[in-house]
Amino acid sequence: MASTMPPPPPQHADGSGGAAPVPDSYFTESRKGEVNELRNLLRNFATERDPQRKRDIIKKVIAYMTLGIDVSRLFTEMMLAIETRDLVIKKMVYLFLCNYATTHPDLAQMCTNTLVKDCGNDDPMVRGLALRSLCSLRLPQMVEYISEPLRRSLTDGHAYVRKTGVMGILKLHHLDADTLEQSQMVDILYDMLRDPDAQVVSNCIVVLNEIMQSSGGMAINRAIMMHLLNRIHEFSEFGVIVVIELIPRYIPANDGEAYAIMTLLDPVLKTSNASAVLAVIQAFLSISRHLEEDMTRHVMTRIKAPFVTLLSAGSSEFGHVHLQNAHALVDLCPGIFDDEYRQFYIKQGHDPTNVQYLKVSLLPKLANPSNAPDICVELAEHVYSAAEPKLSRLAVRAMTRIACRNVGGSGCEQSVALRLVEWLD
C-alpha cells in the first residue's frame, strides 16, 4: 500500500521555504524595547500603590545600569521618582544620578535643586544620603551648590550626617582645593576632633591626613594626641588603627609622656585585631627611640607575648607578614625570641612553602648555647626533604650559619661540620 506523503511547502523566490522570516533586529532590539517598557512604568510611578512594585521597577532600572545598558534616557522619569518617602527607592535613585553625572553633566544639573532640598529633610538618613550624592556628582559647576549644605552638615545634630559631611569635604578638596582653603573648613575639622561620636573623629583624621598630605599629614600636638588616646576604647577597629598610626609622627616631650602614651596603648595589645596589635608595636618602637637603651629592651619584652600569640593564630598570609616582622625585631633586639624558638618550628601539613622558608631562615638568629642542639635537630629533619629542594638548601645554610657564628656553644661547630660531611656521602 502506497503511503500518502504531504505536499512540500511552497518555495519562495529567495528559497527560504514557507517559514516566516526572522528579522535581524529581533534580539538586538529586545533590550531597547524593555527600556521603553520601563519608561512607561516610570511614567505611572506616582499612581502605583504597591510599595514593593515601585521598588521592583527601580531595581530593574539599576540592574540594567549595572549590566552596562544605557538607561540615561530614563533620567527625567527617575528624577520624578525621587519624590518619595521610601528610603530604599531614594538610595537607588541617588545611585542612578551619581552614575550618569560624569557622562551626562547636563542631566546631572537637573537634579541639583532636588538634592539640595533633600539635604534639609527631617530624616537624618535622607539628609546624609542626599549630601553624599550631591558631593559625589564631582562636577566643577556643582561647587557653589555643595559648599553651603556641606557647612551645615558639620553642625548637624545627627552623627551620620556629620561623618558624611566630613567625607564630603575630602571630595570638595579633590574637586576644587582653592575653594576649600578659602572656606576655612579645615579649621572646623580640627575642632571636630572633639566630636562626641568616635566615627566622626576617625573620619576627620583620615580627611585631614589626605588634605595635608603634602605637608606630612595633619598637625599633631600633645593636647590632640592625649585626647585621642584617652578615647581609644570608643573607636572601631578601623578608627583604632587610624589613631595609632599618628603616634610615630609625634615626639614625646619627656620620658613621663612616653610612658603615659604606652600605658594608654597597652590594652590594645590584648585585642584580637592583628592590624591594631602590629600598629601598637610600631608605635612602641617609635617611642622607644626617644628612651634609654634599657627601656628599649623593656619595651621589646612587653610586646613579645602579644606578638608570639599572633604567630600561632590567623591565616598563612598573616603568618608570612608576622614572620617578616619577626626578622626585623630580632635584628633590632637580638635574643628577644630565643626562649620562644619552638614557636618558629615548621608545622608539617599546615605551613605553606613561603612560611617554611621564612621560619628556617629565622631559626639561626634565635640560636644560643642552650637551644642550638634542638634547633640543629629540627633543621636536620628538613635536609632530606625531597619534595622541597630549596627548603633542604635553606636548612643546610641555616646550620652552617649557626656553626660559623659560634653561637651554639662548645662543640657545636664540630658537630655541625661532621653532620655536613656525612650528608656528602
Image (cartoon, rainbow, N blue to C red):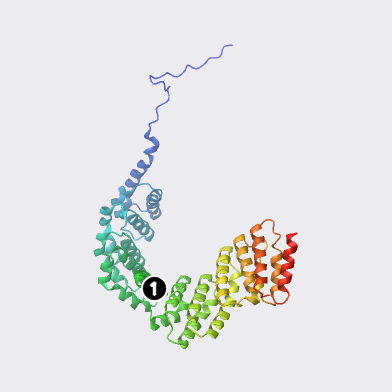
Q: Is residue 392 left or right of residue 301?
A: right
Q: Is residue 155 left or right of residue 263?
A: left
Residue type beneath disc 1: Ile
Considering every residue shown, the one lying at the far top of the view is: 1
Which picture quadrant has residue 294? Answer: bottom right
> How many numbered marks appear?
1
75 is higher (above) or lower (below) than 114: above
Residue 24 place in picture, x, y as percent: 38, 32
Categorize mark 1 by other alpha carbons within 10 Å: few (<14), some (14-19), many (20+): many
Which picture quadrant has residue 374? Answer: bottom right
Residue 113 visible in rendering: no
Q: Residue at x 67, y 64 (%)?
A: 396
Q: Residue at x 29, y 68 (%)?
A: 150
Q: Quadrant of the C terminus?
A: bottom right
Residue 218 visible in rendering: yes
Residue 177 place in picture, x, y as percent: 28, 66
Q: Secondary structure at mark 1?
A: helix
Which picture quadrant has residue 147? Answer: bottom left
Residue 36 place in picture, x, y as percent: 33, 43
Q: Quadrant of the N terminus?
A: top right
User: 178 or 151: which is nearer to us?
Assistant: 178
Q: Is residue 275 left or right of residue 111?
A: right
Q: Is residue 133 left or right of residue 281?
A: left
91 is higher (above) or lower (below) than 25: below
36 is higher (above) or lower (below) than 357: above
Q: Which residue is mark 1?
A: 205
